[in-house]
Image (cartoon, rainbow, N blue to C red):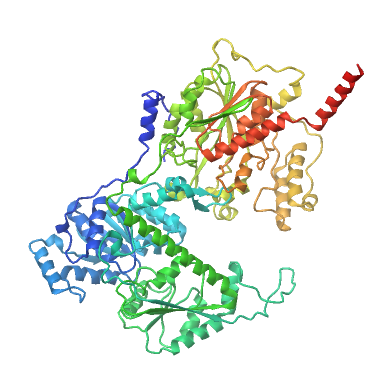
Amino acid sequence: MTHALNLPASPASGSGPGAYRSFLEQKVRTTVSMGFNVADEDVNPLLLPHQRAIVRWAVKGGRRAIFLKFGLGKSFIQLEVQRLTLMFAGGRGLISAPLGVRQEFMRDTQKLNTGDDPAFTDEQRAALRRWQAGHPERFIALKFIRSIDEAEATGQHITNYESIRDGKLDPNEFTSASLDEASVLRSFGSKTYQTFLTLFDQVRFRFVATATPSPNRYKELIHYAGFLGILDTGLALTRWFQRNSEKAGDLTLYPHKEAEFWAWLHSWAIFLQRPSDLGFSDAGYDLPPLVVRWHEVPTNLADGGAERDGQGILFRRGAVGLAEEAKERRDSLPNRIAKVRELIEARPNDHVVIWHDREDERHAIAAAVPGVVSVYGTQDLDEREAAVIGFSEGRIQRLSTKPIIAGSGCNLQRHCAWAVYAGVGHKFNDFIQSVHRFHRFQQRNTVELDIVFTEAERGIVADLKAKWERHNQMVEKMSELIRQHGLDSLSMAEALTRSIGVDRIEVSGDDWTVVLNDTVEETQRMETNSVDLLVTSIPFANQYEYTDKYNDFGHTDTNAHFWGQMDFLTPELLRVLRPGRLACVHVKDRILFGAVTGKGLPTVSPFHAEAIFHYAAHGFDYMGMVTVITDVVRENNQTYRLGYSEMLKDGTKMGVGCPEYILLLHKPQSNRTKSYADDPVVKSRDGYSLARWQVDAHAFWRSSGDRLPTPDELAALGPEILAKAFTEASLRAVYDFEAHVRVGEALEGRHKLPSTFMSLAPGSWHPDVWHDVVRMRTLNSEQARKGLEQHLCPLQFDIVDRLIERYSERGELVFDPFSGLHTVPNRAIRMGRRGRGHELNAISFFDGVAHLQAAEREISIPSLFDLEKFEGAARQGAAA
């Protein structure tokens, strides 16, 4: 992202319709192919038709994701993609794989070089020898390495993820890199997972190859796009996902952008469930039957435990929440392990994997099941890998391990078709990966799963089954997509179904006009010097997208790209504003996360400063800004960047909460020898007192001698009463920082310090720092009830009212080019002004129209006092 404070120049091409249309058309992005065209005869003839097609597609793209269902030949494809890429580009290649998978690649390399596998016919082996004759580059040399010192100058190499994670090997020393089963990186922790993917930034050719990832793990897919260099992860999340403004990381795919998202994904990733999805034969690719048996073991229902106050619970309820689920797993361990032992003793000759999630389960299994070999996290890596390979080759009969350790990548089907689960959990992706260690193409036996759970875990089982069903539905959706478009027929330009432009709609009332249209095009239609005051909250660059139109200012790649579109609007705003009048622009800085920027900690994009320089470059006079303080506790719930626990670890990574700003921008008056506007906003002494002016201009207050309440006094109040009382008290007395902290600590000691909002916010003494904005009193609150999108910090009534009162007169026109729900026109007509707004989102537009019409009705309906006055006047008239 670009965040430098470079002064933007006015668009050299002008701001006419043609130039603006050209700018919008340039927003259409296509997925770049940066690889090599491969002829069919260049591909190893042992590969099946669907594998050959994917190899050619991936090599041509140069940076692609290969998501194949278990058993479709993913390792064959990776090896051949790397071989062909290096044949054209030179250098050396690297495959990163989970522990225990190295042997699979070594085995498949041998197969591709010799045809030595019962699955190949004599004709295929003969074709391979003819294809290899005289072409040494068609043989694959694969070497396992743990450090760069062990690597050859050319050829293919394979390593474990741990070697890269621990800094033993720099992947940027390679020409091409492929991640095998990259979802296993989640076991390193989400932070390590995200930072790991940035370690390959200098690798020219990049690939991801894994079994079909869970479609509901959107962030995983987005991180793969970032790894491949397809699209910045932050931008991708903004483009297709709605963020919960009150909780960081809570994402929902916009319903109206769902088709576009999957189409974009398909332009750089192949999701293949069966060869016939690409039009090839499914011969030999029939999944074996899957038998799932659920075993419920009893729970001591009489052991209900006790509430926090010590009150006993008569009956044990279902395990709800992490704490209760963990307790249930501990308490039920003997019963569950007894069931596991019973199941295995009934089949003494069968090979089996016993999946578990906890260390106490591992130890109990080792004690209860004779001959079981355990694989666990603190085990020596070579020992761990040897155990997995020994089981896959049939030399070990019983294996005990966690899905997060051995559930991804390993092919365990050759000697095993049975798994026993010692418990259940909510982590569906780990579960489904473990299932497909056996249930995969080319498995010759019926796959059997025995899953043990307790009575109190019925809710967890229901949740797991529901996720399984949703997974199957989404997988089918992806299959349908590839059946429709194949590999080469769908480009990014064809995939993105956005359009340019909108059917213009204008709605008016007695004192207001709002227009559904692109604000650039609509503002160009307005008369010069026709607006008395401009109040708006501009989009915060690409923080949000409000529509599926290319006209949307949020549909931009960087801050610089956003200001490039603003270059078409800002000159028009300057033109329509009357000389000497103000544009009041609401802005907020943006948080940049270290996982995206690579800086390791959250930093702040000075968006408000960029806005100041942008408007100044277009001819506005900068008059200063109003600061609106924010609640640091609420902000932390949104971003997790100011966490108290992190502060204790290292205070140097802590910044401060981000306030909102109102930029006060002045259109030059016609006569620069005088400071007055061409038509001044005149105040009368009766309507605008000296006291009000002092508050507006400086607001210096003397102390009354009152004091802050003591911690004991405030702690006796409830949080809601305290929030108001503390702010009011802080305004009446000299502020004491240490006393402020002591009050908070006293509340914390009584467990009465809320974690969801700031209950001890000090009042502001300065007129340009507003502490008393009622944040819930916005039209956005009504939108939230309807489940519609919420702005990061919607423009509050209080802010709009103050600006309108201070900088305009009754009867004048107040304009908002980004009108949203038409808050500005709404407040304008309520304050005796006229309002105008432009909006691109049709839902917001028509909801805002309803609010405007309601406001118009409220204004026209007389109040009770009005009726009394009318009645009195009528009596006087009758008496006369």
431 left or right of 810 in image: left
Residue that lies at the very extreme toward the left in this rendered image: 134
Residue 535 x, y percent position in the rendering: 58, 28
Q: Is residue 766 visible?
A: no
Q: Residue at x 45, y 27 (%)?
A: 521
Quadrant showing the C terminus:
top right
Q: Which one is nearer the viewer's eye here, 744 or 180?
A: 180
Quadrant showing the N terminus:
top left
Is 658 rendered above or below residue 261? above
Q: Residue at x 11, y 62 (%)?
A: 136
Is 784 rendered above or below residue 587? below
Q: Quadrant of residue 224?
A: bottom left
Q: Which one is nearer the viewer's eye here, 395 or 483?
A: 483
713 left or right of 791 in image: right
651 left or right of 436 in image: right
Q: Is residue 754 visible?
A: yes
Q: Which one is nearer the viewer's eye here, 285 or 720?
A: 285
Question: How many labels, in total?
Answer: 0
Q: Which one is nearer the viewer's eye here, 346 or 492?
A: 492
Residue 373 x, y percent position in the rendering: 40, 82
Is 437 rendered above or below residue 714? below
835 left or right of 3 in image: right
Residue that lies at the very extreme toward the right in this rendered image: 879
Residue 435 x, y percent position in the rendering: 41, 72
Q: Residue at x 44, y 55 (%)?
A: 218
Residue 540 x, y percent position in the rendering: 50, 38
